[in-house]
Image: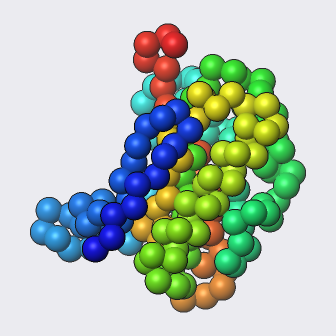
């Protein structure tokens, strides 16, 4: 199995394509039904009002099939940028996803390109690079929908932002 090393914005390293990320203790694939339920429910807020505001105002970025360099909804992406500019202390991860069509390797690569493109766009539009703590490609893991329809596949072609608390006041 190949192991791919991804360099992320704040000099952190993240390993992808490792089986431990995709398998549970019994080496069984993750339960897709759990993730469909997870994405359809409101986020559990652990770190207070700043996290709540982040998830209420920063929305996922959607992409067309096989595309990584153009968001389908530029207005939402621009609104995300503006909210992040207005809240300069918010730190976050950028997480890319892909639909189930295509191979695992292809989707991991595509989701990484989507996440990287979004992170670079944020930086070009004035978001400090050190606020982006991690850029993560998840490929087709953790789906929002598992049906074999175009509408379902579209729900999985996204980049999501995950709040990261500023625990040290830095």
- Residue 35 in view of the camera: no
Q: Which quadrant of the figure contains the N terminus? A: bottom left
* Residue found at the very far right of the displayed protein: 75
* Residue found at the very far left of the displayed protein: 26
> Which quadrant would residue 13 be assigned to in this image?
top left
- Nearest the eye: 128 or 53: 128
Q: Residue at x 67, y 77 (%)?
A: 66
> On the picture, is 7 further left or further right than 17?
right
Q: Residue at x 33, y 70 (%)?
A: 2
Residue 10 at x, y percent in the picture: 52, 33
The count of marks equals 0
- Nearest the eye: 148 or 3: 3
> On the picture, is 43 further left or further right than 61?
left
Q: How is the image coloured?
A: rainbow
Q: Is residue 105 above or below residue 54?
A: below
Q: Is residue 38 above or below residue 78?
A: below
Residue 8 at x, y percent in the picture: 51, 43
Residue 132 at x, y percent in the picture: 58, 35
Q: Residue at x 51, y 13 (%)?
A: 170
Q: Residue at x 40, y 55 (%)?
A: 5
> On the picture, is 29 further left or further right than 12?
left
Residue 161 at x, y percent in the picture: 59, 45
* Residue found at the very far top of the displayed protein: 169
> Which quadrant would residue 114 be assigned to in this image?
bottom right
Q: Is residue 41 above or below residue 53?
A: below
- Residue 19 in view of the camera: yes
């Amino acid at each position: 199995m190949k192991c791919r090393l991804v360099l992320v914005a704040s000099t952190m390293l993240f390993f992808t394509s490792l089986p431990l990320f995709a398998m549970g203790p019994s080496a069984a694939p993750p339960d897709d039904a759990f993730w469909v339920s997870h994405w359809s429910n409101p986020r559990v807020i652990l770190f207070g009002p700043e996290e709540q505001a982040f998830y209420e105002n920063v929305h996922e970025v959607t992409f067309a099939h096989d595309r990584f360099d153009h968001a389908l909804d530029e207005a939402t992406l621009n609104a995300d940028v503006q909210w992040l500019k207005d809240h300069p202390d918010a730190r976050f991860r950028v997480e890319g996803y892909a639909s189930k069509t295509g191979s695992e390797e292809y989707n991991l690569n595509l989701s990484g390109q989507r996440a990287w493109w979004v992170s670079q766009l944020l930086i070009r539009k004035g978001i400090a690079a050190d606020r982006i703590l991690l850029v993560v490609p998840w490929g087709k893991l953790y789906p929002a929908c598992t049906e074999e329809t175009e509408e379902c596949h579209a729900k999985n072609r996204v980049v999501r932002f995950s709040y990261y608390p500023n625990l040290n006041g830095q």
